[in-house]
Image: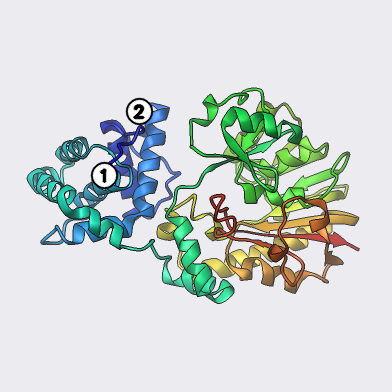
Amino acid sequence: MKLSHDVAGLPSRKVALQHLQNVLIHRRRLREHAPGAREISEADEARAKRLAESVLRNLNRADAVLRELIPRQADLTTLNILRLAVTEIFAGHAAPYAVVDQAVEIAKSRGSSRKLCGFINAVLRRGVEGGGEAWKAVGPKKLPTWIARKVEAAFGSKALREIESVHERAPPLDITLRHQPDSLRLATAFAATVLPTGSLRMKVRPQVSALPEFESGTWWVQDASAAVPVRLLGNLEGKEVLDLFAAPGGKSMQCAAAGAQVTAIDRSSSRLQLLEHNFERIGIDCVAACADALEFRSRRLFDVVIVDAPCTATGTIRRNPDLPHTLATPAKSLAALVSLQRASLEKAASLVRPKGKVLYCVCSLFPDEGENMVAQFAGQAGLRASGAEAFAEGIEPDWKTKEGGFRLRPDFWPKLGGMDGFYVAVLEKE
């Protein structure tokens, strides 16, 4: 067994457990603060999150190993300690003796599990001896039924299985460049691949702020599929662009780097501060305003209005394995989001100039939020689908959808490492 070079220490493992407790017990997102996270280094907190994400991606495999070893129902805290250890041994390839010893140490620090230290030690030692086969025998973790049904109905059972397989693998790090001519130079510096659409993809996931030219703003982190929508807009030099749901700012930065004058709005002041920090780092100006997109007023119209609409984010499960555990009850939440998406499109149509463009995108796998939304809306409010594929490199023919948009899926680019799920449409104002 090859041992990992990124082994979590005891502080990271404790915080990873707290993250798991947040997700699996309290239904909170991984990005929310975990108690104890501020007491450890940035590097240890990053390891803690990676370990928690690995557990969530491999929950079915960890439980298959433990199912053969636990004679009785364990409380959730004890079960999560065991899941962490089993995952680090079989997915992270950490030294088993260190993982077992530290799992016992974690149990000693938890009131509910303190009396079960001997039990945890015995279970894990038996798991190390014989759990490998049980781990390998289980297939990729299945999506929750309500998500799987929609994905299967839209794309078929084969695509569903392939998407679930992609979700099991930790995603690579994708980078968008401020200046595309830098791609070959930075690809060499980062040992990265230049993707067909122009993004760089790194083979490993290092500490981002430690990478070359981070402070100089030559690049920023952005999934390759999230970088596609702006590339469908063509020449943006001198254009006035309004980004209605702008934070954390990836699409706004792409537009500004292409020579556009950008107005970025977001209703979250903290997220808007992150956007302004990102713009400051890359050395580009924009007008930022804290406002509700549906309440935004402007005396002038814009050449381009971007609607990266709030959605279920089901296309980002490969990056956010906590999502299936934290998404709200489907029917009501989806209906509310679809209503907001339609209202956002109507708002965008009122703010774009004649012959201007509305860029609509969602990081969702659901046609109700993508294809169906545009099919129902196109032709209304004087908008029609554009031949945007003429502007972008790397756009594959089968990404085009019948209503004129583009469907990106996690199982696309299988040999390159996949991508987030996205739907994109460029609508022109008549």
Neighbours of disc 1 within 10 Å: few (<14), some (14-19), many (20+): many
Of residues 426 and 187, the one nearer the viewer is 187
Amino acid found under the numbered disc labelled 2: Ile
User: Measured from the top left, where is residue 282 in percent x and y?
Assistant: 69, 28
User: In this rendering, would 220 be left or right of 15?
Assistant: right
Residue at 51%, 71% (x, y): give it: 158
Residue at 84%, 65% (x, y): give it: 383
Name the secondary structure under disc 1.
Answer: helix
User: In this rendering, would 241 be left or right of 288?
Assistant: right
Is there CB contact under 8 Å for labels 2 and 1? no
Residue at 60%, 35% (x, y): give it: 274
User: Measured from the top left, where is residue 184 in percent x and y?
Assistant: 69, 33
Q: Disc 2 and disc 1: Cα gap in Å?
A: 23 Å
- Whether 170 is drawn above or below 430: the answer is above
| Foreground disc of the pair 2, 1 | 1
Question: What number of labels is visible?
Answer: 2
Q: Quadrant of residue 269?
A: top right
- Whether 212 is drawn above or below 409: the answer is above
Q: Quadrant of residue 278?
A: top right
Amino acid found under the numbered disc labelled 1: Ile
Q: Quadrant of residue 382?
A: bottom right
Rendered-image quadrant of the C terminus: bottom right
Q: Is residue 286 visible in the rendered structure shown here?
A: no
Q: Report the residue marked by disc 2.
A: 40
User: Measured from the top left, where is residue 95 in percent x and y?
Assistant: 24, 37
Q: Report the residue marked by disc 1.
A: 89
Name the secondary structure under disc 2.
Answer: loop
Rendered-image quadrant of the N terminus: top left
